[in-house]
Image (cartoon, rainbow, N blue to C red):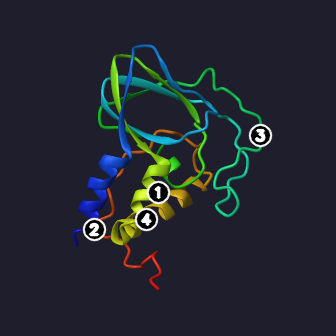
Amino acid sequence: SRDVPAAVRHLSHEALSEAAELPDCCVFSTGDACARMLFVATGKLRYREGIRSVGVRTAQVSPLSFDSDWSINEDGAWQDVKKGQWLSEPVLYTTWFNAGELTSITYSLLVTLGAHAFAKVITEYPKAFNIAAAHANMFVQQLNTKERAPSDVTPQVAPPTRWPRKSFVTRA
């Protein structure tokens, strides 16, 4: 099907943009409302999780709601973020507030994927939408487990070898 390549082309024209960051600049902070996913194209950045206490997370009303006070993890370790990594993926599938602080170490170029533009474009391509919806479902289920604190840094994992056959698009 030509659906997926067409969706990728459309996304690249409508939803992707670039953001240049100077050294020692804060890209986002704990609690900031998030509207875009970030891909590191060049440069080095550092990230530190900043939430110790998180409220209830539900997918029914608000996929991510923080009911407790914000608490900066002052003694938390910084982790390096470099070319090829991505951040804030949850914003594509749920309401998201940054769960930590991202700071540039060197001149850095980030490719941004706007959440609203992603949603608008992906719904125009049924096969691409089905793939994205299956991934989103698994991703939000993982977010809603309490195995680890929420983070803006997505663990780097291999994609599934086989996508689910179940369609999320109902045809009239």
**In this view, 157 is above or below 128:** above
137 horizontally vs 22: left or right: right
Q: Residue 45 placed where, x, y %?
A: 40, 24
Q: Amino acid at mark 1?
A: Ala
CB atoms of marks 4 and 1 within 8 Å: yes
Q: Which residue is situated farthest in the top direction here?
A: 24
Could you tell which of marks 4 and 2 lies nearer the N-terminus? 2
Between the C-alphas of marks 4 and 1, the distance is 6 Å
- Give residue 87's quadrant in the image: top left
Helix, strand or loop under label 2: helix
Identify the residue at horizontal 28%, vertical 64% (top origin).
Answer: 4
Between the C-alphas of marks 4 and 2, the distance is 11 Å
Could you tell which of marks 2 and 1 lies nearer the N-terminus? 2
Residue at numbered disc 3: 68
Helix, strand or loop under label 3: loop
Report the disc number at residue 3.
Answer: 2
In the image, 54 versus 165, the foreground residue is 165
Q: Residue 52 placed where, x, y %?
A: 67, 35
